[in-house]
Image (tube, rainbow, N blue to C red):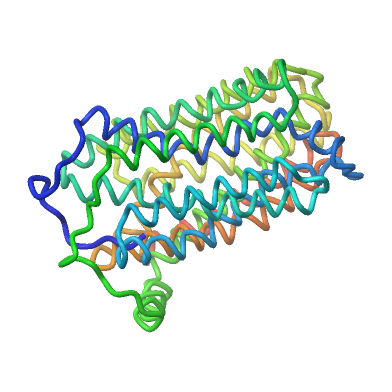
Amino acid sequence: MYFCSQIMADEIEYPKLPTFIIIVALMMALVALAIDMMLPALPMIGDDLGVRMPNDNQLVVSILFLGLAFGQLLYGPLADSYGRKPSVYLGFTLFLIGCIVSLVSNSLFVMLLGRFIQGFGLAGPRIISVALVRDRFAGQEMARIMSIIMAIFIIVPIVAPALGQLVLNVADWKYIFVSFLIYGITLLVWFGLKMPETLVKSAANKFTFQKTFKVIKEILNTKTSIGYTIASGFVSSLFLGYLNSSQQLFQETYNLGEQYALIFALLAFAVGLGSFLNGQILVKKFGMQKMVKYASFMLFSLSLLFLIFMMSFTHIPSLTLLLAFFSLTLFHVGILFGNLNSLAMEPLGHIAGVGSTMVGAITTFISVPLGIIVGLSYDGTVFPLIIGFTLLSGLCFLVIYRTNKL
């Protein structure tokens, strides 16, 4: 995302801090909500839309990430050229249109079109929410506020599938999109009434393709940035493959039914715990480079050992053993997420805005196709997913090891 020069807080009449934090957190949380609330509904959506291959239902999740990737390329420059609020309005409008398209869909193609539009729209509030924090705060105060926002954000993936299941207990899957519409409209109105425009005219940057391509070229020539970005893409691929497969794996292979929401919540907590401990303790004590090297090595080692175990004994391990494996590996994924993004951005401080946009976009463009391949490989066992974990974590470790030496 593009960021302009810091705007002093006393120039703008901001809402009270609790209101500001809640609005920004809810904007960021909408992405996780739009992904994870859908998970329990995937088989019902597939049945109603006449999907022949059950694995294709996973595309309802994956295609939203693709929309996010393309959207990231638009909203950063737009927000720095025309303002934060118009960009958020555009993003929310596209998201709501996408929800309506998915709501009235009668085929998988139309559903996926709606989901892509949702993702493209969601990139706006997701990116600009961070810009709003940077416009108001700096230094340690910004870090403190972002920590509070991320603590709220981490809760969403934990509860979202349960919320989706709650809707399905009283209505059909279309009402999940109705809930998105209500959430989006309410938040848009609240944002419009309470949040001021934080981009002053004197700080606006005129968007040009020439300027953008120049910055992209600089990023691609910064070896450490591109290395950590590629590593982040492999970790995100692994995680997306897990997201795509999780509903079928736990509800079909392990026959957990509605307990899936609880299992997903427990594993989401492992990711959140890894992220939290990393930010509060581990990075301060060991540094980012040591942590990503350690976490990627552990992720690969655990995946390889578990793959060898399954090849030797069974492709469907006990639920207890599988949950132990996922808890440990996803804990290390939580460590990697924040650190890899920060390391990729470290040499790009002078172009932080567009640098962040491009790092996020490249990561997503890597993760979506690979994550789809892992998810679509589901065959009723855990085996394809663990193969994906092993290969992608191994590539991640090799790239990190190589990049740390640059």
Residue found at the far bottom of this picture:
210
Closer to the camera in the image, 12 or 3: 12
Q: Is residue 338 left or right of residue 332?
A: left
| Residue 328 at x, y percent in the picture | 55, 29
| Residue 221 at x, y percent in the picture | 40, 77
Image quadrant holding the C terminus, namely bottom left
Residue under the image location 67 percent in, 36 percent down: 305
Closer to the camera in the image, 346 or 400: 346
Where 122 sits versus 160, above or below?
A: below
Residue under the image location 72 percent in, 16 percent down: 169
| Residue 244 at x, y percent in the picture | 70, 41
Where 318 sits versus 32, above or below?
A: above
* Residue 113 placement: quadrant: bottom right
Q: Is residue 3 left or right of residue 97?
A: left
Residue 397 seen from this side: no
Where 50 sits versus 86, above or below?
A: above
Residue found at the far left of this picture:
10
Image quadrant holding the N terminus, namely bottom left
Closer to the camera in the image, 146 or 384: 146
| Residue 37 at x, y percent in the picture | 62, 31
Residue under the image location 52 percent in, 37 percent down: 32
Q: Is residue 236 left or right of residue 247?
A: left
Residue 11 seen from this side: yes
Closer to the camera in the image, 327 or 92: 92
Residue under the image location 35 percent in, 46 percent down: 129
